[in-house]
Image (cartoon, rainbow, N blue to C red):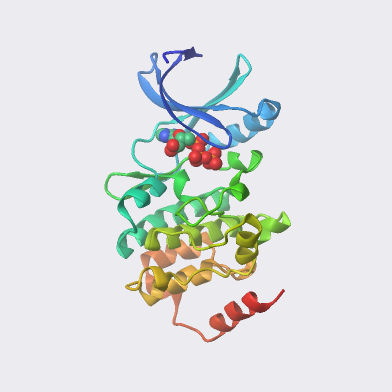
Amino acid sequence: MNQTIRGYTLTRWLGSGGMGEVYQAHQATTNRTVAIKLLRQLEQAERFRNEASVQASLRHPHMTLLYEFFVEEGLSCLVMEYVEGPTVEQFLQRNGPLPEATAWKLLGQVASALTYLHERGIVHRDLKASNIKLLPHQNIKLLDFGLARLANSPRLTRQGHVVGTASSMAPEQFRGESSSASDCWALGILLYEMLTGYSPFGGSTESETGRLIQKADYISPIKLNASLSATSVRLINKLLTVSPERRLTAYQVLEISQDPDRLGTADWVDPIRKWWDKIKR
Ligand SMILES: Nc1ncnc2c1ncn2[C@@H]1O[C@H](COP(=O)(O)OP(=O)(O)OP(=O)(O)O)[C@@H](O)[C@H]1O
């Protein structure tokens, strides 16, 4: 280790993801600890630069700061705020599902960050438990957002039944459509995982999982957590809805997380819609 790139001394390897390797690094001039992502997709350097300049201007208490982007010796480098702590995925794997009140609190923070992005016309596109860090006092931070859309997403090749590894693609993303509503689908998956410890969609092959997603045919969360409140079950239902137009928005989720009564009373149309989504071709 101890390789230096543009004044950043790499001190620890943090892991690798779909876009490249991530290191903890130290900048001597500012005495700052940062996370540096070394990106593999060199041919995309210009697009990353444009994207990074937009993101560097974003400030939100639940989003990781992006400090700078540069290309050095053929490596595209993204320098971000270093966030200590486990990801939500790691926490769930170690400790099992969260108490409902905690899950709702974290959901509200993620919804607040998404509202901030959506108001600026930015779609995250890769929201998942492994991209969210858990800080002390039940606080979260989203790791680098938005850039994921430029990568060749490996999500469809990852599947299974354990939390965080199943696909978090929304039904419309199978048709190549993506919008802020797709992030709200991911919000539904996140809530489901936080409350049950499992991903909502089974399926032993990629195509089977994809088929289940496109019908919103998920395992009832009550089967995995019998003590779940009817309100949580309904919130999951209103997020894991096939039609993007009928899904709750991030702002609505933010409001509901502060006042669950805003979810309204159960209506009889929802179960019929669910049934129709499952049986229609
Ligand atoms: N700003 C950061 N602070 C601390 N750790 C980070 C930071 N950014 C990423 N990491 C860690 O580095 C590792 C690799 O992250 P990366 O985002 O590349 O991969 P990923 O989330 O597993 O995959 P994907 O690229 O599909 O999102 C993960 O363990 C992640 O928690």
- Tell me which residue sits at (58%, 22%) in the image: 70
Above or below residue 234? Residue 62 is above
Residue 52 x %, y % = 58, 33
Residue 90 x %, y % = 38, 46
- Tell me which residue sits at (27%, 48%) in the image: 137
Q: Quadrant of residue 278?
A: bottom right
Q: Name the foreground residue: 129 vs 239.
A: 129
Describe residue 125's horizontal placement relative to residue 66 as left or right. right
Describe residue 139's horizontal placement relative to residue 14 as left or right. left
Farthest bottom residue in view: 268
- Image quarter where the N terminus lies is top left
Farthest left residue in view: 137
- Image quarter where the C terminus lies is bottom right
Q: Name the foreground residue: 33 vs 281.
A: 281
Q: Quadrant of residue 169?
A: bottom right
Q: Does the image show residue 224?
A: yes
Residue 123 x %, y % = 60, 49
| Count of marks overlaid on the render | 0
- Tell me which residue sits at (59%, 80%) in the image: 275
- Tell me which residue sits at (45%, 78%) in the image: 264
Residue 2 x %, y % = 41, 13
Q: Name the foreground residue: 264 vs 177.
A: 177
